[in-house]
Image (spheres, coloured by chain):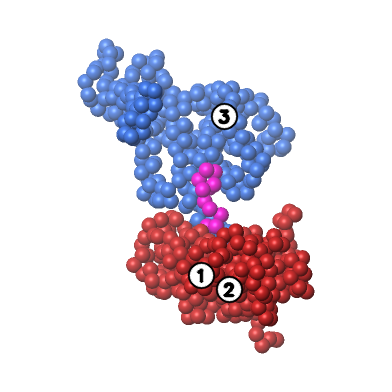
Chain colours: A blue, B red
Amino acid sequence: MTLRAASTFLYRRPAWYLALLLVPPLLWFGTVYLGSLFTLLWQSFYRIDDFTAQIVREPTLETYKLLVTQPANVDIVLRTLTMAVAVTIACALIALPIATYMARYARGRMKALFYVGVMLPMWTSYLVKVYAWRQLLAKEGIVAWAAGKLGLAGVLDAALAAPGIGGPSLSTSYLGMFLVFTYMWLPFMILPMAAALERVPGSLLQASADLGARPAQTFRNVVLPLAVPGIAAGSVFTFSLTLGDYVIPNVVGAPGYFIGMMVYVQQGTAGNIPLAAAFSVVPIVLIAVYLAIAKRFGAFDAL
Amino acid sequence: MVTEAMTSAIEFRAVSRIFGDVRAVDDVSFAIEPGEFFAMLGPSGSGKTSCLRLVAGFDAPDAGQVLLDGADVSSVPPYDRNVNTVFQDYALFPHMTVLENVAYGPRVKGVARGERETRAREMLDLVQLAPMGERRPAQLSGGQRQRVALARALINRPKVLLLDEPLGALDLKLREEMQIELKGLQKKLGITFVYVTHDQGEALSMADRVAVFNKGKIEQLAAPRELYSRPRTEFVARFVGSANVAPAALASTLGAAQAFAVRGENLTVHAADAGVPANALAAPGTVVAVQYHGAVTRWQVQLDGGEIWSAQVAEGREPAGLAMGSRVLLSWPRDSAVALTA
């Protein structure tokens, strides 16, 4: 009886109903997600005392100054940024044909198969996959072995000899790290891209062809602009996941530090929470800049 | 070069299109003359839209040939055909302005920006949307979107304009206005219009000729007046004229040699014991419903053969003393019955 009265009361007062529904999750989200994030970020405005190694809790830009003036720190940011951009572009190029097939051509069981196939690798442990890749890419690993059998050893050696990205083997080079990153984040690009392409009505493509556009023109003028919000969403995933990751650079690749590793080291062994916090701000700023540029170029006009 | 007296704008030669077990278009042949307003009428799934897609080039026939202007285009892609389409959902590009939508045809053909925008503005003028050029399709009403779709399809100056249920999404009043406007536009531009619709009123009021589709075949192809007054098949009689049909079995009990159709306005409702008028045929039945429609009242009568017929009785001429459940006699002049072949 009281439940019924309460139902009637809430039905007549939608604002109360909404508040009852929203306040608990919003409190949780606001406190645990945003609250802790801002608490962390706030620490980037503290600094570490050089002599005592104690955190000085007074607002200052000293730590940021350290971040942008020390060449080693700038190198880390640039290295991570370059990797994130390269991984994002590679993922977008690989994902586009797959997502197009999934959204436009695959039907019924084939479509289900593709969606499950894209998600399946995400159901296994991330660490297992990273360590597996280290084995695959090792000097005596299956990739090098297959390249040798196929007579492509020269190609592999030439790639590994490339300055900056090469190294003694794939598993100890930036090239190898790039392969693992691309493998790891590809599903995060395919799924939003396929979702965006699914929403493009087939009649728009017919209308384009009807008005005289060849398939390449239809792709450039209609499909791509309408897929861009999906590409933007996917690239935010691949970009930010690469910027923040510290496991892959630890397990695979050359010894140079990445932002994620730096955060780990600074807040752990070095005990420099302010610098770790300042490094955490970098991906947020980079993604904000990236989104602003994307918006500027009309990436979200079709939303 | 051989020139014929008149090459058809569109010609279907024994065209079939088969999806699995379904013959969507089943051995269809017909020709549409240049400048004609041609309607394809039929219920959903009758093959009319499949035929339209074959003309536009979105689909290719499994058998037979589709000719445009005398040339076989069966395997020519849509972007190489001088045909444009107004889509049922309008298919306006949501990321472009109205002007960009209309200018899209010239744009993909490489026309310079200045010229294509001038032409697009002319087209917007033609459909009375000149001030709307900078808006997005999402900011327009249904009727306005319809006009943009029309302008966009006409800008390439096609020889043939295909319209796929173009007024289906509009409300009744707007639909009637657009019917008049479309017909006027077609007269003015002299373009061949192929108009797909499931609305028989629309087809009859606008088209020069109507092809009635049923199960992938054309049941009858004729001018609207003939289609209405002389339906050839039971399907056409029912679908186009909403006529009362006596199938062969019923017809034989009424003294007719073959199946026939009678329109409701030719039926008279009498009391059951009335005599049959001279030169008339009659059938006994029971009144199952009386519907008042203003100018006419429709008397639904279940004949003793089971068929339900609808008699239209003019205002002020209702039969006295009869009501729902009454036994009645329906009569019609002999010459008002149209013999049907199937």
Element assignment for label 2: helix
Q: Nearer the viewer, residue B170 or A169?
A: B170
Q: Chain of mark 2?
A: B
**Magenta span:** A194-204
Q: Chain of mark 1?
A: B
x then y, percent, for residue A76: 41, 30
* CB contact under 8 Å: marks 3 and 1: no
Q: Which residue is mark 2?
A: B265
x then y, percent, for residue B38: 59, 74
* Residue B84 shown left or right of residue B132 in the figure: right
* CB contact under 8 Å: marks 2 and 1: yes
Q: Is residue B115 shown above or below A285? A: below
Is residue B266 something that shows in the picture?
yes
Q: Residue furthest top?
A: A52
Q: Is residue A298 shown above or below B3? A: above
Tell me the CA gap for discs 2 and 3: 71 Å
